[in-house]
Image (spheres, grey):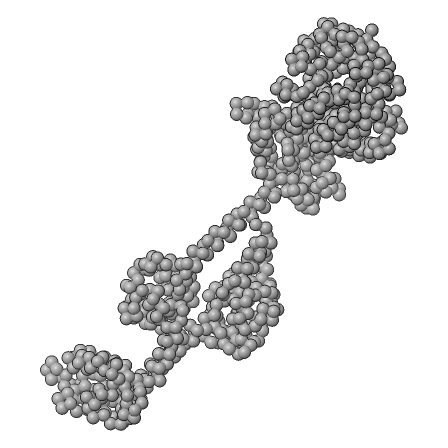
Amino acid sequence: MQRADEKDLFRSCIMAMGSGVLIQDADGAIVDSNEAAASLLGISRHDLVGLTAVHPGWAALRDDHSDLPAEEFPSSVALDTGAPVRGVVMAAHTPAGERRWFVVDALPLRDRSGALQGVATLFDDITAQRLAEEELALAQTRLRQTREAAAVGLWEWDLRTDELWHDEGVTAIVGGRVESIAHWLTLVHPGDRPRMEKEVEAVLSGQHTQEVHYRARVLDGTERVLLQRAVVVEWEGERPARLAGTTVDSTALVRATERAEHLLDCMTDAYFVVSPQWQFEYVNREAERVLARTRSEMVGSSIWELFADAQGTEFQRQYERAMAGVTVEFEAYYVGLDCWFEVRAHPVSDGIAVYFRDVTERRASALERERLLLSAEVAKRELAHAATHDGLTGLPNRSAATEWLGAELADASDSGDPAVLFIDLDRFKLVNDAHGHAEGDLILIEAGRRLSRSVPPEVMIARLGGDEFVVGIPRCRSLQHARGLAEELLKAFQEPFAVGDRRFVVTATIGIALAAPGATSLTLLSDADAALYRAKDQGRNRYGVFDDEVRDRMVARLHMEADLREVLDRRELLAYYQPVFSAATGEAVGAEALARWPHPELGFMPPDRFIPVAEETGLIIPLGETMLDHAMRDHDEVRERLGADGATLWVNVSARQLDDPAFASRVLARAATLSHPGLLGIEITERVLASTPGAADVLAQIAAAGVRIAIDDFGTGYSSFARLARCPVDTIKIDRSFIEPLTATSGQPLVAAIIELAHAIGADACGEGVETSEQLDVLVDLGVDTVSGYLLARPAPLDQIGRSALG
Ligand code: C2E
Ligand code: CA
Ligand code: CA
């Protein structure tokens, strides 16, 4: 997931939340909020922006109704301490003056580096709970106060005479004089009468005295709630003879209590209060439902007896904390009901009040969401890793290496600048091609491991791609230090690589560059690359250092590239032609086109110097096209001068040209203009055939149209017999290095073998670079089909092509 997506997800989560959310910056100013926050605070999201805790409109209160100063707001505390603040109960006022109670969490927000950026405040409205609770508490206090106050009616009942006496207090309460207990009972509300009668009986049978609340329609006709208490003051043997008691008018009180209880009952949260002795004091209707117990079962019972399986769990730990005076908030699983509960418990005057709700379902979906977020997080981390790491070896990739170098260069210190070792595996392409990419990959992985093992931990190793690795030395002390490391690395490649039961010797060549003043990661890498090229020129399995000589060569190369471009643009590149003769008849049978660059100082720039530059820079494509154009244009004249109407004109083609998808069609379009397509031939080196995966297909396409194919420089390129046999080859050109040492007494077996091989795949064998008649004689004896060389004819411009033939 991209970072932007992640932010969007986070935002939409916040916007959809039922809780209010405020996002404040490091100065405590609100920068964002959700709809819930706006509606809970009664301020639009727009108007919330910029407000801070010091805004006087909040008129904030603590849990105990004292003023809450701005610096004690949960968000202020979180910003101050950098630590989250949870479960703070506070009140704030809306612009309309309405007081709202909230329970608030404040979470510090940090950026990736861990620096405090701001704070997120999450809050829920608990005003309804709070009001109900306050009212209940008030009612209970009043009850206590009323009981404690002496404003009660007193009465006495003589059981022997059934005589009832009461004082003025009772008269005031019941609105007149009550004659007898029977009379009193008629005042009791019919619904409460059976209970009252039972109570009377209980008292008469000598049981302990009871406190009874009951409704009554008193003598003035009004409905009241009375609280009655009775004590036996005289006994006759086992039986009570005289009762005395008090009557309290608790109408107002009970009404308030009822109202509070009604409020609590209407609450969607379950609610109960437990005493310091852990007895249920009050339970609302929702709690009855959720806990599947009735109020009468619970009130007066011990929570730990009724819900024994909550003992020793999170519930007990948290309730004990609440009992000790802390507001707690938690989510926990209750095994007895197989439910997850979200719980908030806070101390009240006499015990703790507990709000809770069943969140099993919400939790299931939250878990699912968390799982999704987690997998998104993992995917994101993998993506980030993939962006900076090479999938094959697990090493940092090119962009990570560049970044590392950039940071090291920026960090340049007295102890030294970074150095780069550019590593290229020798002959890797051949292994890869001969044995397949799977084995090649295994070698790359092993190479990465060997490199990692050979360097100290502070050194960076990356794979740039293909068989190129780079090693970065931070604060390199000296060139000597880098050389030492290069030697270590070369040693790591001495052991052959084992793949399956095969073993391959894959050596490495290394270019070293030290950061020069003003170096960037790119110049440093390209310096090391230039040093690597130089080392390769001098033979592989070694290291080379980027020094003034390499720098000069690099500069010369750049100049050469510019010059070559100009030569091509100005159409100054020439074609020379070198005739090829039949070994059997001595007749000319073809000619090879060779590129010539007329150079103001050198006379001619040698192809061995400019062809590699053309290959590297891609200029070989226009150069190759120019040569094909020359050949097509000169074709008739070359054949005429050679006196061979059927002579084939051979043009050299490089790997880059074969990779060009339009190449085959361009060659074929030209061949089509000839009287016979076999009058055109292309030469590719054995090295190109061996190392260009698509070469065989392109060649097959060209050969199918009748254009001829020659494999150049044969014997130097490690191509496999199988690959060669699959190729539609007309001619195999034996490399000059085999011809040169050829005499009547030496070098014959190798050349004989190549000629035999050519014939075995149905191709002609051509001996090129023939300089002596001895070489020529031996070649003819060995059965070579065609020959060329300075002995016979030098490459020459069109107008100087001779008719020379073997004599
Ligand atoms: P090559 O394809 O092997 O071409 C034969 C080279 O051997 C030519 O060198 C030629 O002048 C030289 N040669 C011919 N007979 C003798 C001999 O008896 N003794 C000696 N010592 N050398 C002889 P040249 O023209 O300098 O080209 C060098 C290489 O440059 C060519 O080797 C070929 O690989 C490349 N090249 C030349 N022209 C082109 C071109 O148009 N396109 C491409 N892609 N490569 C070219
Ligand atoms: Ca050639
Ligand atoms: Ca050759």
Q: Is residue 613 visible?
A: no
Q: Nearest the camera: 230 or 674?
A: 674
Q: Nearest the camera: 469 or 39?
A: 39
Question: In the figure, 655 relative to 344: above or below?
Answer: above
The percent position of residue 158, horizontal first and vertical second, equals 16, 89
The percent position of residue 792, horizontal first and vertical second, equals 82, 12
Left of 403 or right of it: where is 230? left
Measuring 53% from the left and 75% from the top, which residue is drawn there?
Answer: 94
Q: In which quadrant of the rendered view does residue 180 lie?
A: bottom left
Measuring 68% from the left and 29% from the top, which residue is drawn there?
Answer: 543
Q: In which quadrant of the rendered view does residue 342 lie?
A: bottom left
The percent position of residue 58, horizontal first and vertical second, equals 54, 74
Measuring 35% from the left and 78% from the top, which residue is drawn there?
Answer: 258
List the single residue furthest toward the front.
675
Measuring 20% from the left and 82% from the top, which residue is drawn there?
Answer: 197
From the image, which quarter does the C terminus lie in? Answer: top right
The percent position of residue 93, horizontal first and vertical second, equals 52, 75
